[in-house]
């Protein structure tokens, strides 16, 4: 009888889970709200040809109609927010870590730099085609060979430097 108890104990130990199953379960997070306002403390510093300009703030974004909008995001052309970003300018967007990306305005292919506000409240600087600012990527391309959106972006953005030619 003792032998059977030892065998039963070994079988039970071998079949037990290494972790608590209830602890590994996660509840689905709530979907983001339909309309997200920019962060109240938003402060994106702007310089034009080395001279400080008025920062991009939540108030500016709330009072300036977006150039592009869909249910998931709103986007403002950098030239709408900073009129000094004239055609031929370079727009450099910087992250808090100091990593920057330079965007030509417009690019040789006609792309324009924009500031996105996503439904999750993220602010992103990227370049878009004004004819199709929010292209579809899901379900296109072959399995595992989808290129997706290969354009560079800066998120979060803390500073814009505009150099006019």
Image: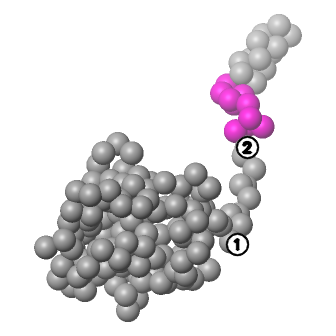
Q: Secondary structure at mark 1?
A: loop
Q: Which residue is mark 2?
A: 25
* Label 2 vs label 1, nearer the camera: 1
Q: Residue furthest left?
A: 165
Q: Residue furthest top?
A: 2
Q: Is residue 107 above or below residue 152?
A: below
Q: Quadrant of the N terminus?
A: top right
Which residue corresponds to the image point at 26% horizontal and 58% vertical from the top-left?
Answer: 51
Which residue corresponds to the image point at 37% horizontal and 87% vertical from the top-left?
Answer: 130
| Dot 1 alpha-carbon crowd within 10 angstroms: few under 14, some 14 to 19, many 20 or more | few
Q: Which residues are magenta?
A: 14-24
Front residue (pair 11, 13): 13
Front residue (pair 49, 149): 49
Q: How far from the left and from the top, in percent, is residue 40?
A: 62, 56
Return the mark for residue 86: none
Label whose residue precedes the other's in the sequence (2 or 1) = 2
Q: How far from the left and from the top, in percent, is residue 77?
A: 40, 78
Q: Is residue 101 magenta?
A: no
């Amino acid at each position: 009888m003792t032998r059977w108890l030892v065998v039963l104990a070994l079988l039970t130990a071998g079949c037990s889970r290494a972790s608590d199953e209830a602890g590994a379960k996660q509840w689905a997070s709530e979907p983001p709200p339909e309309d997200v306002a920019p962060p109240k403390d938003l402060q994106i510093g702007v310089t034009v040809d080395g001279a400080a300009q008025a920062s991009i703030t939540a108030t500016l974004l709330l009072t300036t109609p977006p150039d592009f909008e869909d249910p998931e995001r709103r986007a403002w052309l950098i030239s709408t927010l900073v009129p000094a970003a004239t055609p031929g300018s370079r727009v450099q967007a910087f992250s808090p870590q100091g990593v920057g990306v330079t965007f030509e305005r417009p690019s040789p292919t006609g792309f324009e730099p924009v500031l996105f506000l996503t439904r999750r409240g993220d602010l992103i600087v990227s370049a878009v085609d004004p004819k199709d600012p929010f292209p579809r990527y899901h379900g296109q391309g072959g399995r595992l060979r989808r290129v997706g959106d290969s354009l560079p972006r800066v998120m979060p953005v803390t500073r814009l430097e505009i150099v006019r030619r």
